[in-house]
Amino acid sequence: MNVLTIYANQNPRSFCHAVLDQFSKGLAEAGHHHEVVDLYGIGFDPVLRGRDVPSWMDPDLPQEILDRMDLRNELLGSVRGPIRRFLVKRWIGNKDARAIIRALRKDRIPKDVLEQQAKVSRAQVLVFISPVWFVGLPAILKGWIERVFTLGFAFGLTADGWRGDLAGRIPLLTLDKALIINTTLFDEAAYQSGLGAAMKLLIDEFTLSYPGIKQVDHEYLYAVYGASDETRRGYLERAYRLGKELTIAPNAVIADRLSAAS
């Protein structure tokens, strides 16, 4: 299988990095093709900026919302200086709003986003390895999702979706599986008491299942700072086996899960 791992930890000597190493070792021994994106290593910019706006534009959004955007004047008002304003005005020309959006999406989506989206498109399995921060993902990883899982790539919206209907989201991702491996500060009891349910809703379901990933598994390695050496060795063995034994649920099992979720 083609496996893409998105890794987020700033310390190359962390326990989390040892988890990545063992997981990667298991994948290699199982014969999987594996690529790692080390977000800190590549200096990935997690901040949504003005250049990301084309990634979140939809040429098919309802007319009344498109009219309210007043896109032509919005673009002209966003540039400074008469020369830049003249160039933008000439680029707009006689394009209507939908044509402007199509042109922006064709030419102005940031290169680093397109590179990451290409990696996701080639993968069958997407893996995230990181610590838990504030009952969620580290900022750099959350930012990767926000910049890469964009409108028109990870999901679309129906007209009702644009008007606020949660059911109006159209899944576009075709990956077979996502696996999240998180190291935590707090113990299993804390996650059983509600932290795990919160992360399942926001990450497993809304961020990954909702855009179309067929199977989502979440593995916690609890309380790694306070764990004994024996427990930590067990966690590393678990990471190795997660790689070595990586499988995709049969279609029938996936269908049952989707039916149960609906």
Image: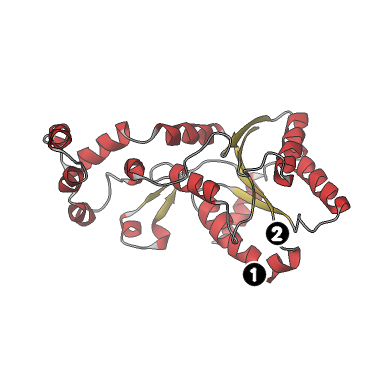
**Residue 164 appears in the figure:** yes
How is colour applied across the structure in the image? Answer: secondary structure
Q: Which mark is residue 194?
A: 1
Quarter holding residue 193:
bottom right
Left or right of 39, for residue 164: left
Three-letter amino acid code at the position of disc 2:
Leu
Kind of element beneath mark 2:
loop
Three-letter amino acid code at the position of disc 1:
Gly
Task: Tell me where residue 132 appears, x and y as whole percent.
Answer: 63, 55
Q: Is residue 28 above or below residue 80?
A: above
| Distance CA(mark 1)–CA(mark 2) | 15 Å
Task: Tell me where residue 48 appears, x and y as whole percent.
Answer: 40, 47
Quick one: quadrant of the C terminus?
bottom right
Residue shown at the point (85%, 53%) measured from the top left: 231
Q: Which residue is mark 2?
A: 185
Kind of element beneath mark 1:
helix
Task: Tell me where residue 46 appears, x and y as whole percent.
Answer: 47, 45
Viewer-proximal residue among 131 and 173: 131
Task: Tell me where residue 246 appears, x and y as whole percent.
Answer: 72, 40
